[in-house]
Image: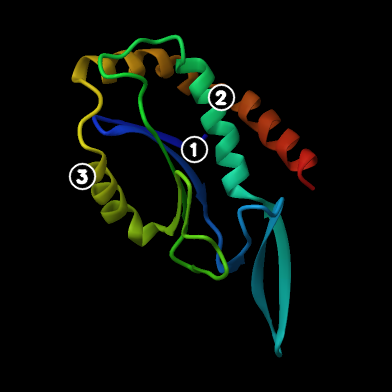
């Protein structure tokens, strides 16, 4: 998980992709494609694991971790944001797929504002603090553990 935002409207889970070029892919495809110009009319293509599926895994693990907690107005609502840098063009990519929002960084702030307004207040300040206290220990991961995780992902999704 790249970022988790706890807000009165729900839990926002972000997957960030700092890519350039053209990005294409569908919800069903296991891999998406990054296309970069390579000069003289050529292009270079690189595939990467579908970020919708990737964030689904993050959401599932987060849900499992938080499921035992009790909330005043029922379980929290989860929102998924897959954020690409402003140097890429999202071509043939679903901009919205279920709870997933796929967008460029420049669109993020207004999209979250709009989402929060639509969702309304669902979590109290006390619940947000409890969520924070439950999640905070997972933010202090050793650099060696992070590198091992990155390498295992790289090998798994070659």
Looking at the picture, how far across and down is residue 151, in whole percent? 73, 36
Q: Nearer the viewer, residue 17 or 147?
A: 17
Q: Nearer the viewer, residue 110 or 117?
A: 117
Q: Residues within 10 Å of mark 2 (few under 14, many from 20)?
A: few
Q: Which mark is residue 61?
A: 2
Outermost residue, bottom direction? 40
* Earlier sequence position, callout 2 versus callout 1: 1
Give yes or no for contact between labels 2 and 1 (Cβ–Cβ under 8 Å).
no
* Earlier sequence position, callout 3 versus callout 2: 2
Q: Residues within 10 Å of mark 3 (few under 14, many from 20)?
A: few
Query: Considering only vertical position in the picture, is 66 above or below 29?
Result: above
Measure how far apart labels 3 and 2 are at the Cα level.
26 Å
Disc 3: which residue:
117
Q: Is residue 29 left or right of residue 127?
A: right
Query: Considering only vertical position in the picture, is 70 above or below 125?
Result: above
Q: Is residue 133 left or right of residue 8?
A: right
Q: Check disc 2 and report its element: helix, strand or loop.
A: helix
Residue at x 76%, y 44% (from the top left corner): 157
Q: Which mark is residue 89?
A: none
Q: Nearer the viewer, residue 63 or 72?
A: 72
Residue at x 39%, y 10% (from the top left corner): 69
* Earlier sequence position, callout 1 versus callout 3: 1
Q: Residues within 10 Å of mark 1 (few under 14, many from 20)?
A: few
Disc 1: which residue:
2
Measure how far apart labels 2 and 1 are at the Cα level.
13 Å
Q: Is residue 54 left or right of residue 124?
A: right
Residue at x 28%, y 20% (from the top left corner): 128
Q: Check disc 1 and report its element: helix, strand or loop.
A: loop
Give yes or no for contact between labels 3 and 2 (Cβ–Cβ under 8 Å).
no
């Amino acid at each position: 998980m790249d970022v988790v935002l706890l807000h009165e409207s729900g839990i926002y889970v972000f997957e960030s992709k700092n890519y350039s070029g053209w990005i294409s892919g569908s919800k069903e495809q296991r891999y998406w494609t990054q296309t970069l110009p390579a000069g003289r009319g050529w292009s270079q293509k690189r595939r990467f694991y579908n970020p919708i599926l990737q964030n689904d895994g993050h959401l599932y693990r987060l849900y499992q971790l938080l499921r035992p907690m009790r909330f005043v107005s029922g379980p929290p609502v989860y929102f998924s944001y897959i954020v690409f840098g402003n140097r890429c063009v999202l071509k043939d990519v679903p901009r919205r797929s279920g709870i997933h929002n796929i967008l460029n960084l420049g669109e993020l702030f207004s999209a979250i504002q709009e989402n929060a307004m639509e969702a309304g207040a669902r979590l109290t300040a006390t619940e947000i603090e409890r969520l924070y206290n439950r999640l905070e220990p997972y933010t202090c991961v050793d650099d060696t553990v992070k590198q091992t995780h990155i390498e295992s992902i790289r090998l798994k999704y070659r």
